[in-house]
Every structure is written in C-alpha cells, then in structure tokens.
Image (cartoon, coloured by chain):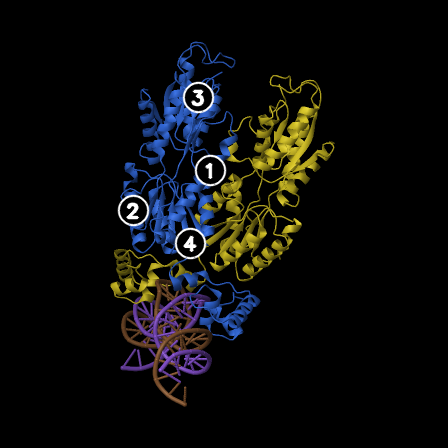
Chain colours: A blue, B yellow, C brown, D purple
Amino acid sequence: MAASTLTEVARLAGVSPATASRVLNGSARKPGQDIADRVRQAADSLGYIPNAQAQGLAKSSSGLIGLIVHDIADPYFAAIARGVQEAAREQGRMVLLATTAGAPGDEKEAVAAFAARRADSIVIAGSRSSRTEDTDGNADLAAELDRYCRNGGQVAVVGHPVVGAAVSDGYHVVEVPNEELAASLASELAASRADDDFVIIGGPEGLFTSDDRIRGFQQGLAEAGRPPAEILRSSFNRAGGFEAGLTLAERIKAARPEAGGVGGTGNAGGSKGLCIFAVNDVMAIGAAAALRSAGLRIPRDATIAGFDDIETLRDFRPALSTVHLPLEEIGRIATRSAAGTAAADGTAAPSPVTGRVTLRRSTETAS
Amino acid sequence: MAASTLTEVARLAGVSPATASRVLNGSARKPGQDIADRVRQAADSLGYIPNAQAQGLAKSSSGLIGLIVHDIADPYFAAIARGVQEAAREQGRMVLLATTAGAPGDEKEAVAAFAARRADSIVIAGSRSSRTEDTDGNADLAAELDRYCRNGGQVAVVGHPVVGAAVSDGYHVVEVPNEELAASLASELAASRADDDFVIIGGPEGLFTSDDRIRGFQQGLAEAGRPPAEILRSSFNRAGGFEAGLTLAERIKAARPEAGGVGGTGNAGGSKGLCIFAVNDVMAIGAAAALRSAGLRIPRDATIAGFDDIETLRDFRPALSTVHLPLEEIGRIATRSAAGTAAADGTAAPSPVTGRVTLRRSTETAS
DNA sequence: CTGGTCTGGGAAAGCGCATTCCCACTGCAT
DNA sequence: ATGCAGTGGGAATGCGCTTTCCCAGACCAG
C-alpha cells in the first residue's frame, strides 16, 4: 500500500492533476472555491502527503538547509544548531545535519552531499583552519562550495570565510568579532588582575577562531601595557584544556615556596598570580578540572577565563568569566542570511553579532 | 550554469544514459571496463553530482534518516544525536533533524514531513507523554507513524513506545531500563545515606521517562525498607530543577534550629539529612544551583543525585552522583535497529541498553 | 449581436534518474 | 553451417509533481 499520489487525489476529486496541484500547494493560480474544497477533502480522506522528492525535482529546490558542524554533541555547536533549526522552521524548511570533526575533506563531502540533495542553502559552523595539512582539503572544499554557489546555492559561514573561497553573491560570512572581544576581555582582566601574569591556552595553530582570540587577547594586553602572554597549544576541546591545565598546575606548584597542600595561604604573599585565558569555555573547564585535580583552587591559586559562555556550563563553580556569544542568534543569523529572502531584501544586512565580556567569580580578586 | 546531469555525462562519454547510470551508481549490471572508464572520466570532468532527489524518486528511497528530539541544545539529546549521526554515516545516510519541544502535535508534523521526504527511517528520541492534554496529539502521532510504517518506513523510538501505536514490523523500541536503574540508585543511596530522608524532583506527571524513574526509585526505597519519598513536580529542565530546589532550600533552612549562615555546622547534629533525587542531571544541576543560591552546600546540607550522566556536566563540583546512560550508544542502537539491515539480519537483536549507578561526591557522607 | 479580453480548468511536457525490456552480437555445441 | 544461450549496450517508460501552453466558456464594450 504505497502512499497515495496527487493523481489519485485528483481522480477522486474529479479534477485534473494540474488543478489538484494548484490547490494543494501554493500556486500562483487559485482554482475556484468549490473545486478547492473538493480537492482538499479528497486529499485528506486519502491521507495524501505530497512527495517532497518529486516536488523538489520539479521545482528544483528542496526546502532543505544543510548544517555542517564539527560535533553536534559539543554544546557550542548544539547551541548554534538550535538557532539554525529555529530559523529553518520559520522558513518552513528542514535541516540536514552533517558532522565532520573539522576535517576539510569531510566538509567537502558534506557539501557535495548537500548539493546532491539540492539543499537550498548551507550553513557551515565551526572554525576554519589554515594548517598546512588541511591545505588540500581547503582547496577542495572551496572548489565544491564555489560550484554549489554557481548552481544557485546559498552558503553562510560562521566566523571566517573558507580559505580560498571565491567571493560570489551566494556566499555570506557571519562575522564574529572574536579578536575585538578577546581584546576587551584582556583589557578588563588587565585592570582587575593588576598583579597577575597571563597565560593563554590555545587550540592548534592555524585554527582561525583560536588564533583570532589569541591575537586579540595579546593586543588587549599590549594596550594595557602588559607584556604578551605565553601561549600553550593543545587540542580545541576539554581534553586539550585539561592537558594544558596539568602543565600549568605543575608550574604553579613549583613556583610556590611552601608545598601546595590544601589549606595553604594561596597567593596572598604578594607573589604574582596567574591568570589563564582559555580560548573557549570547554577548554577552560578542562583546565580548571586539571588545576583542581592537582589540588589547586580557583580563583585562589590561579584565575581563569574562557570564551563562548556556554549555557550548560553556567552552573559551574566558581562561575566562569568568559565572553558571552549569542550562539543561538548566530545560528539564526547565518540561516537567514543564507535564505533566499535575505538576498531579496537586498540591503537588509542581518544585524551584526555582538558579544559581551562577562566577568564572574573565576577571575575575582581573592578576598 | 545548472548542475550537469547524467544525460550530459552520457553524451560526453558517447554512451546511453542507461549505461552511464549503471557505471556511476551501484547497479547489478557492470558495463565493460573501457566504457566504465570513459564514463567515469566524463563524469568528473563535468563535475557531475547525481541528483539525489531524482534518484530517490526513481528508487523510492532517499538515504535519509529523520531524527526527532525535543531540543537539540539539550546535552541529553545532543549526545543521542551524535550517536545517530555516527550510525547514519556508517550506513551512508544523512540525518534530517526536527525539534519539537516534546509536543506530540509537532512530532506528528515532523513525521509527516519525514514521510514526505521519503525518509528511510525515523528515530524518535525524547520522552513520550500520557498527559491528558496530549491525548489528541498522541493519537495523531500514532496514526501518522502507523501510516508511515505501512508505507514501508522503519521507526525506532527511544525509551517508551508511542502511546497507542500499533505494533508493526517496522516499529522498534529501544528500551531504556529507567525503572530498574532508578531502583538500583535508590537502593545504593539507601545504603549509603542511612539517616537521610528522600525527596524526588520529578518532571510533570505523565512524562514516561520521569514517571518510570520515579516509580523505580520508590520501589528501590521500599525494598530497602524506606518510606516512599515525597515528590515535587516541575518542568523537565534546568529551570524546573531550580524552582524545586528553591522550595527545598526553604524547607531545609526552616528545619534547622540555628540560622543557616555560612560556616554553620551543617548537618552534624544527628538531625536527619535530605537526599534529593532529580530525575535527570540537568534538573539536578538546577536544584543544586538553587540550594547554593540559598547559601546551602552540597553534600553538607543536602545530598543530591541525578540521572543520565551528561558528559558536559561531569566537571561540575561537587561531582554529581547519577546513573550513567550510554546516550551515544543509544542513538546508534536506535539508528541501526531502524535500518533496513537490521530487519534483514532477522534475529540479530541489537544489544540491550545497560546503565550503571555512579555514585560521586554529591551524595558522599559528610566528613 | 458580435468581437474582444479574461478567467479557470485540462493536456502534456518535462525535472533527472533507475530499470525493464529489447536487440545485436558473440561464442559455443550440435 | 545452424541454432542456442549468454552478454553488453540502448530505447523507452515511469517515479510524482510543477508548469507552460492551450482551449472553452463567461463577460464586457461597442
């Protein structure tokens, strides 16, 4: 018992398929009221569900929007995905999900798959990379995107443009002011942590998001008259933060004259404290966990700040200083800017993304 | 410049479209080596990408799997989604995402949309509800699923069967032993918290997952010779947990003879302690935050346990006692059991879901 | 009353592909 | 030399829908 077709509905209603199509789907021509009623009645007496594939084939558009993320279980991407999903629903589209772990090769395949499904638009979240091992992948990805755009596809990239992508009118970038915000964070921290040394826990070199935030932070430090911070590189996730945190914990303990047992006086003696900036919240949490596992306490033995303001992490204690990013909104903006409507609106540029430095307990001056 | 078609490739290669189709897509008939090479070469010189819509139309299958969740930004669903995504990739399919906030009406629409797109299978995560206001929605959803299955669709539901769904051979349920696990948790807690009273923070009545866990917990308590716990109902998310937590905080403070300032002696005086079981981790975190905001400390002034073992929450302190659920695996299992292959394998029932009670600091006996 | 313009419905041609059927040809046994 | 199965390619049909084009009738002005 296959699903019923438009033709069957038409026959039941005693009209031609053309007419049935016109009444059941938004067509320019509106058939007469009586006929419309008859068709609609026939349709739901048959439980008719239009075949989106056939519709797509005929109209060459699918009502699909492709979303590419590194990892859907990462709360950063999950938040963006929620925004995308929401905007998609507004537009009456569905979202197709692809996860790639950030490998440009996989992303290229995802784009090809979306193109095959004739997705109306593609949203690419997740940091672009300029690492040399990704050069080929980036080129392939750029070529694939280019082709997709030339065939009328719309793509929106969150953060940075894809390396080497040609600027076409179907290609939008949702700029996230990572650098400026990191600079603001640095300047605020420089003010409140006057006696601290700074150290940065970053992702692998070449990851744009990470690099931007590092650069911005250093710049903010410089403007505040502080020396540049040392940079520890590790992977862009919780594990990376943890690893770097262990390294830092060793140093902190080594630098302390007395043994660092629980109940120590902490950093009160005027020796310089350490303020850690992890380039994202998840890494910051990892680092904090590492410090704690080494018997150190935050903000007593070191202070720490992250970036993103992940919602799920907001109950973490001590509350994490960070930079708030409207992740969900970013997802919405990206989706809208890649919607056909945005292009039609012409100059209606989507509102730019704004973040906000949010200092909390994890960088508060020890009492 | 529209995307190139099979016909164009065939023409370039000097063969018929039929032959081109046979070489480019896995067909039973394999054309000769020389011809195959010619076609393949023509294909990628043209940058040919098969039109999945047309393929789907012709084959009436789409390589799509639909995933229904309440909220993709909820780490519980995000984790399941990762598993689904992973399994889908193994099968060479893509996942279509729909979020419904748990409203059966929306879920019905999502199923219809998936059916329209001729998704090969549908995975429904997220608790079913038997609330009276959802009765109609549930019936609609069941009818829609039924139709989908009759048309050859496969559906897998995580947790509970959809209310009123007819058992058909395309309908699979991935059982999660919520009740048993909650009972185990209760029994372990009853043993380690010999002097505590128990209270349960549950979701709205009628939510199966919540109800099962509550029932199981009560049963575990009973088997341990404890009286049933009082049940506080609120919404099934962090906010609900927070709200219930505030209520409990009031009570705890009221029950304490001396004022509950910081530095109080806590619960040492032999008065009975309170052990809170929140039916999921996110609610537990919310409740913990509420207690903390009221100046109470865990596990000193109250102990608390959750359910799910959400990864992102694992760095929360005090570490949350909970029941570990292999969320990602659950997603994989659901996806596989809804794959055509699972049906083909016949008796190869997917391994059942097993959880594990995981006691951590949040329910540790106060030192 | 007639010629013209609308209006609303139907017939038919694809959209891009898979697949069934058909046919020409080869190679082998008879 | 003849008949046969077997092989490999092409023509044609259809998946379910949209949309252009066409046509019959209605309606108005002249």
Asked if marks 3 and 4 fall on the same chain, the answer is yes
SS class of the residue under badge 2?
helix
The quarter holding residue B10 reads bottom left
Given the image, on which type of amino acid does mark 3 rest?
Thr
Label 3: which residue?
A303
**Looking at the image, do the residues carrying marks 1 and 3 touch, with CB atoms under 8 Å apart?**
no
The quarter holding residue A333 reads top left
- Give the camera-side residue of A322 and B5: A322
Q: Please, is residue B241 above or below residue A305 in the view?
A: below
Label 4: which residue?
A64
SS class of the residue under badge 1?
helix
Instruction: Tell whether B253 sits left or right of A292.
Output: right
Distance between mark 4 and mark 2 Cα atoms: 21 Å
Measured as percent of width and height from the top left, residue B176 is found at: 60, 43
Q: Report in which chain the residue with disc 2 lies.
A: A
Label located before the other in sequence (3 or 4): 4
Given the image, on which type of amino acid does mark 2 rest?
Ala
Distance between mark 2 and mark 3 Cα atoms: 41 Å
**Looking at the image, do the residues carrying marks 2 and 1 touch, with CB atoms under 8 Å apart?**
no
Label 2: which residue?
A142
